[in-house]
Amino acid sequence: SSPPPHHTPLTGLAVDGKTLRGSRTGDDTVHLLAATRHDTQTVAAQQQVKAKSNEIPAFTPLLRSLDLTSTVITADALHTQHAHAQQVIADGGHYLFIVKGNQYTHPAPPAQSPALARSDPQRPHRRDRPRPPRDPPHEDLHRPPRPA
């Protein structure tokens, strides 16, 4: 189904790092950080992570080359950083980051984000009525009866 006419469809972009097996640059293996589209699995941007570093400093330069308007950036817990969230929002995008228990000080997502403004706490899961009950098992399927 198509989105309602007043909502702009969002494109998903996954940011993740990969170490290339069997690759060598001097004494180190090659580690890349890539932004991959969810819908087509194509790489939109990619860059090599500097040796003796990690993916965190490479996140900002990677996304700076992309237009993040109407884009949701997904990333693992390594990228759940205040600066990363602020950059994505400043560039017109949205984010969905994994927050683990040791990141209790991470701020709540901004309420002004249009993607998040669609949810209504009075209507959990956007349901107007309760789910219909499941169909009972059919007798002709030769299944043993379910315990009560």
Image: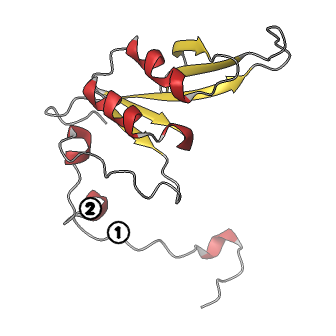
Q: Residue at x 28, y 31 (%)?
A: 89
**Where residue 57 is drawn, which disc sits there?**
none
Tag nearer the camera, 1 or 2? 2
Percent x, y of residue 12: 42, 29
For mark 1, does the 10 Å Cα neighbourhood hold few (<14), some (14 to 19), or many (20 or more) residues? few
SS for dot 1: loop
Amino acid under disc 1: Arg
Q: Quadrant of the C terminus?
A: bottom right
The image quarter containing residue 34 is: top right
Amino acid under disc 2: Arg
> Which residue is at the front of the view, 110 or 141?
110
Q: Residue at x 28, y 33 (%)?
A: 2
Percent x, y of residue 11: 37, 27
Q: Quadrant of the N terminus?
A: top left
Q: As drawn, which residue projects farthest toward the left?
A: 6
- Distance CA(mark 1)–CA(mark 2): 8 Å
Percent x, y of residue 106: 39, 51
Q: As drawn, which residue projects farthest toward the top?
A: 26
Q: Residue at x 54, y 29 (%)?
A: 56
Q: Are marks 1 and 2 in contact (CB under 8 Å)?
A: yes
Q: Residue at x 58, y 29 (%)?
A: 16
Q: As drawn, which residue projects farthest toward the front?
A: 52
Q: Is residue 78 above or below residue 24?
A: below
Percent x, y of residue 146: 64, 83
Q: As drawn, which residue projects farthest toward the bottom?
A: 148
- Looking at the picture, the colour scheme in use is secondary structure
**Where residue 127 is drawn, which disc sits there?**
2
**Where residue 131 is drawn, which disc sits there?**
1
Q: In this view, does 104 lie above or below 17?
A: below
> Which residue is at the front of the view, 62 or 40?
62
